[in-house]
């Protein structure tokens, strides 16, 4: 019931102008941090209901470059001839009218629950930052748990990485919004989590991820690469090698408990064809 309320909050963002959304995302992020990523998967699966504008990733400098430049000659021709300065009374009156209009516009925005485009973009950027901060925390925790041979007491389903599956699903959905500055670190984390190793004789850890989870790591990398074709220059050979190794290791007739989610069942053949 609590998760449904959070999903409704994210979906009906227009009713609270996004301010409640950023607060909810931050609270969930703090909750994940305090509990050392040992929560029920539904606690972050609600992030999949978040909605972001497509142009949120564009830089303001790039937007200014896109704007067409006016011809200087045309500007000179369109310049209004200089007028005589108005007297002090008229100037004061114009300032009062302008100030009153700004106050009225501010009151109208407050009543209609509409945000200025810049304010909306700022709130969405903060929300996106808190979202990816949580996802990266889960990835790094999963890496540390996989490399450690100590057993972790589980409080929820999913083994010692209960939040990894919804985390990977969220990264795949919002892959087109990931900052390119963090792309290298993300690819490196997913490569380690997928179980790829240059040493063929290396023995996997006792606390390693399941085949299903490692397959999902490879699929997320392909999604990230597909969403950033023009800007991302990554050699995916290692991931293709690991993907085929995992397919050979994945035996539904022998290991019945290793099952892929329905969403990944549809995407796996597409990845193989590519």
Image: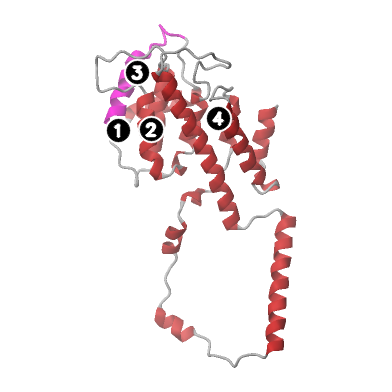
Point out the tag, 1 or 3, that comes first from the N-terminus: 1
Q: Residues within 10 Å of mark 2 (few under 14, many from 20)?
A: many
Q: Read off the residue under disc 2.
A: 221
Q: Quadrant of the C terminus?
A: top left
Which residue is rendered at x = 45% and y = 86% of the image? 77
Q: Read off the residue under disc 3.
A: 247
Mark nearest the camera among 4 and 2 is 4
Q: CA distance from mark 4 to mark 2?
A: 25 Å
The answer to which of 221 and 138 lies nearer the viewer is 138
Q: Is residue 52 visible?
A: no
Mark nearest the camera among 3 and 4 is 4
Dot 1 and dot 3 residues touching (CB under 8 Å): no
Point out the tag, 4 or 2, that comes first from the N-terminus: 4
Q: Residues within 10 Å of mark 4 (few under 14, many from 20)?
A: some
Q: Read off the residue under disc 4.
A: 33
Which residue is rendered at x = 69% and y = 28% of the image? 2
Magenta segment, which residues?
236-256
Q: Residues within 10 Å of mark 1 (few under 14, many from 20)?
A: some
């Amino acid at each position: 019931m609590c998760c449904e309320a959070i999903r409704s909050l994210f979906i009906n963002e227009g009713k609270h102008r996004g301010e409640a959304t950023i607060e909810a995302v931050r609270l969930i992020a703090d909750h994940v941090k305090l509990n050392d990523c040992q929560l029920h998967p539904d606690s972050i699966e609600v992030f999949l209901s978040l909605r972001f504008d497509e142009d949120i990733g564009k830089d303001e400098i790039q937007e200014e470059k896109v704007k067409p430049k006016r011809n200087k000659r045309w500007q000179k021709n369109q310049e209004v001839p200089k007028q005589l300065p108005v007297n002090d009374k008229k100037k004061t009156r114009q300032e009062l009218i302008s100030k009153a209009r700004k106050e009225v516009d501010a009151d109208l925005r407050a009543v209609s629950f509409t945000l200025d485009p810049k304010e909306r973009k700022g709130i969405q950027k903060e929300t996106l930052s808190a979202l990816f901060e949580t996802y990266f925390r889960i990835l790094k925790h999963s890496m540390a748990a996989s490399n450690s041979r100590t057993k972790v007491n589980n409080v929820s389903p999913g083994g010692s990485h209960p939040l990894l599956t919804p985390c990977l699903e969220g990264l795949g959905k919002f892959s087109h919004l990931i900052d390119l500055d963090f792309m290298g670190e993300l690819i490196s984390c997913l490569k380690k989590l997928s179980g790829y190793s240059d040493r063929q004789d290396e023995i996997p850890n006792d606390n390693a991820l399941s085949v299903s989870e490692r397959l999902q790591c490879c699929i997320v990398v392909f999604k990230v690469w597909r969403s950033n074709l023009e800007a991302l220059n990554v050699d995916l050979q290692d991931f293709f090698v690991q993907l085929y190794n995992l397919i050979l290791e994945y035996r539904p007739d022998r290991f019945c408990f290793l099952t892929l989610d329905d969403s990944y069942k549809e995407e796996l053949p597409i990845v193989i064809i590519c």
